[in-house]
Image (cartoon, rainbow, N blue to C red):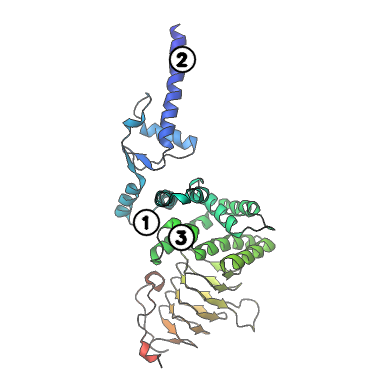
Amino acid sequence: MKTKVSLLTSVLHHRLHSKSLNFVGSLPHFYPLSHPQIPFTDSPKQQDDQLAVCVHDSRAQVLDQFFCIPISTIHTESSSKHGTDKQDDDDIWLIMKDEARSDVDQEPILSDYYSRSILSHHTMESALSHHLSTKLGSSSLPSRTLHDLFMDVLTGDQDIVGAVKDDLKAVKERDPACLSYVHCFLHFKGFLGCQAHRVAHKLWSQNRKILAVLIQNRVSEVLALDIHPGAKIGSGILFDHATGVVVGETAVIGDNVSILHNVTLGGTGKSCGDRHPKIGDGVLIGAGTCVLGNVRIGEGAKIGAGSVVLKDLPARTTAVGNPAKLIGGKDNPVKLDKIPSHTMDHTSHIEFYDYVI
């Protein structure tokens, strides 16, 4: 009899223990105070590992024994200790989900939208696949088909996922109009167009060119920017506004580059093969600029708005005008001491009275 009672008690204890802790884990706004760095995840295996750390004895824990603090507070403390530029990549997804919950608290009518777009997904890859496929799907190209295609590429290439997170950081740091990571993820078409291009470029490199060009076409129709899937783009990219951006097939864009709207990285129309610009790391290209031909823009260079660049531009220099000329002259150009794509400074070292009629 004692054995039966003991067995029944053990089973009941296990059920209560699991349910009570699963209930705590189902509250996405909170962490246990004793272990503020350990979030409850949706994975049963990870939950078991984490709960083994959080629970101090074998007895079932009830909810009021957990003193909880908001995730946002933890993120703030983490940011103050390590700096936002050193946030762990995994933290970005956690921050985005926290931002989404905050947005829903402010605007409850958006709860379904945020649930479908962010909160119902376990990974950034899943959320991005869903969001891009919803944006780019059509009656003849179902979003379900696109979702599976995007998911397959993103889960198979973590370098792309890393670049996505670097792009999110770049937009948040450089664009004062960006309210949050989740704001960029959901609403900034320059960011979305760049991520769709990353998928298209992967397909292009796998010789799946028909699919790659199809994605390019849908991005052009829906988001109003046209990036050939053959173009190579680094990470930490900001396409600010992005309307009217055109990037040719053999163009190369380095890391940490900022490009504004109506920028063309095109050919001259007279050559074949490798015929498009090569943009170095840290370059800033102002709105309405055309860079034409297989020219090289040196690292950390800046091109003023409305310029037409037809020749190579040395590193850390500034060019403006049509045709573009170096500030300070060809023999002694003014050298920039800061990375222009980070500062987003469009006017320093440019004496406007030299150009105003």
Q: Where is residue 36 in the image (x, y as percent from the top left)?
A: 34, 41
Q: In this view, does 110 lie above or below 34?
A: below
Question: 224 or 268: which is nearer to us?
Answer: 224
Mark 1 belongs to which amino acid?
A: Lys
Q: Where is residue 186 in the image (x, y as percent from the top left)?
A: 49, 57
Q: Are marks 1 and 2 in contact (CB under 8 Å)?
A: no
Q: Distance between the residues labelled 1 and 2?
A: 50 Å
Q: Which circle marks residue 8 in the picture?
A: 2
Mark 2 belongs to which amino acid?
A: Leu
Is residue 242 at least partly visible in the picture? yes
Q: Distance between the residues labelled 3 and 2?
A: 53 Å
Q: Do the residues labelled 1 and 3 touch (CB within 8 Å)?
A: no
Across the whole image, how many numbered discs are drawn on residues? 3
Q: Which circle marks residue 239 in the picture?
A: none
Q: Is mark 2 on a helix, strand or loop?
A: helix
Q: What element carries label 3?
A: helix
